[in-house]
Amino acid sequence: MKIFTFSIRKNFFNLVFIFFTILLVFFSSSNLVAAKNGLALWANNIIPALFPFFIATELLNSTNIIYIFGKLFNKFMRPIFNLPGEATYPLIMGFISGYPVGAKIVSDLRNKNILTKAESERLLAFTNNSGPLFIIGTIGIGLFKDTTTGLILLITHIVAALTVGIIFRFWKYHDVNISSTSNNIKIYTNNICFSNIGSTLTIAIKNSIVTILNIGGFIVLFSVIISILNKMHFIYLIELVLNPILNIFNISNDFSNGIINGIFEITNGLQQISSIPIKNISFSIIISAFILGFGGISVILQVSSFTSKTDISIKPYIIGKLLQGILAAFYTFIIFHFFSFLSLDLSNIVKVFEYL
């Protein structure tokens, strides 16, 4: 029995991948439809919202913006988040660009020794977030057909992330290893001029294409995985466990499948939740706030692809995102429960986001 158990552990992933390949063939017709839907979702919603920001991020990485932020914001970042001023850059870009830009920047800063291991883990827990174009454009306008919904989700998403950052300031609080950013300024202080702007832009586009293809691959893969799990009735078994929990909060069981899908892959889950017909739309928005904050297993694996090249532990990130999802849902509930009298007619601000 011990030999058999050891053999399974040793060949676990071999067995999983073989089983997955068999299921791809067995459910080929439904998998084909799921893959096409995943590709359409990626091409129509993800690329327009994220790809330009990925290029902008790559271009900024080639400047001395990190050093400038370090000098300007160190006096704010240390007392609030227990982080150096250089952490401002991934914090801002994580909010502007969306998943998984924040994780990529944090991993890059750790590889350059600009941040310590503890600082990187502390920062990663709250800087890898959905961007405003995705939340307002894709989720608000595209899925819910309402800009105010997107704006509410954006506000609660940001506030929840900052709350997690304040909480995580105590993560490895007594870490005595201080990042020596002053000794590493030359590593990330580059001089961009007219003579090398072409090559810099080319590299930025290439890196952005790799990142956006990586995201598309995860979306298509998890679309197929979710389809297979549905065909095997595995999702149904999870729903049987989840439904009693939803009943406690007086939430319709119609949401259980969308929540499970969102835990696996954020975009598919949000698309399904937004399409559920319900009189009280606030339930859909609160659940969407949780999924947006958590990010899903797909995003966790994308983050892991960056952190695996460093000594950063993925554990604090998972804890931070779960906490952010809960806080975002709670803040969204507060808005609907206590501030329902507010108009929230901020169409001018929304038009600015749409124009950008």
Image (cartoon, rainbow, N blue to C red):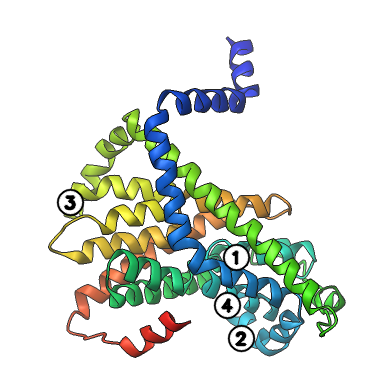
Q: Residue at x 50, y 28 (%)?
A: 20
Q: Determine which of the numbered discs, if any, sits on residue 252 in the image.
A: 3
Characterize the local packing of mark 3: few (<14), some (14-19) or many (20 or more) Cα atoms within 10 angstroms.
few
Task: Depth check: give the residue in front, 132 or 48.
Answer: 48
- Residue found at the very far top of the displayed protein: 1
State the image coordinates of residue 303 (x, y, percent, origin top left). 60, 54
Mark closer to the chain start, 2 or 4: 2
Q: Amino acid at mark 4?
A: Ile
Disc on the earlier residue, 3 or 2: 2
Drawn side of residue 131 relative to residue 124, left or right: left
Q: Dots 3 and 1: beta carbons under 8 Å?
A: no
Residue position marked by numbered label 2 in the rendering: 76
Q: Amino acid at mark 1?
A: Val
Q: Label 3, secondary structure: give it.
A: loop
Which residue is drawn at the image coordinates 47% and 58% (left, top)? 43
Query: What is the distance, in whole Å, between disc 3 and disc 1 at their CAs?
Result: 34 Å
Q: Under tag 4, what secondary structure? A: helix
Instruction: Estimate the x, y position of residue 72 in percent, counting from the top left.
Output: 68, 90
- Which mark is nearer the camera, 3 or 2? 3
- Residue 91 visible, this orientation: yes
Q: Are marks 1 and 2 in contact (CB under 8 Å)?
A: no
Mark with earlier residue (1, 2): 2
Q: Earlier in the sequence, mark 3 or mark 1?
A: 1
Q: Amino acid at mark 3?
A: Ser
Q: Nearer the viewer, mark 2 or mark 4?
A: 4
Name which of mark 4 and mark 3 comes first in the sequence: 4
* Label 1 sits on residue: 101
Residue drawn 35% across the image and 77% down it: 151
Disc ID at residue 92? 4
| Residue 239, image quadrant | top left
Q: Nearer the viewer, mark 1 or mark 4?
A: 1
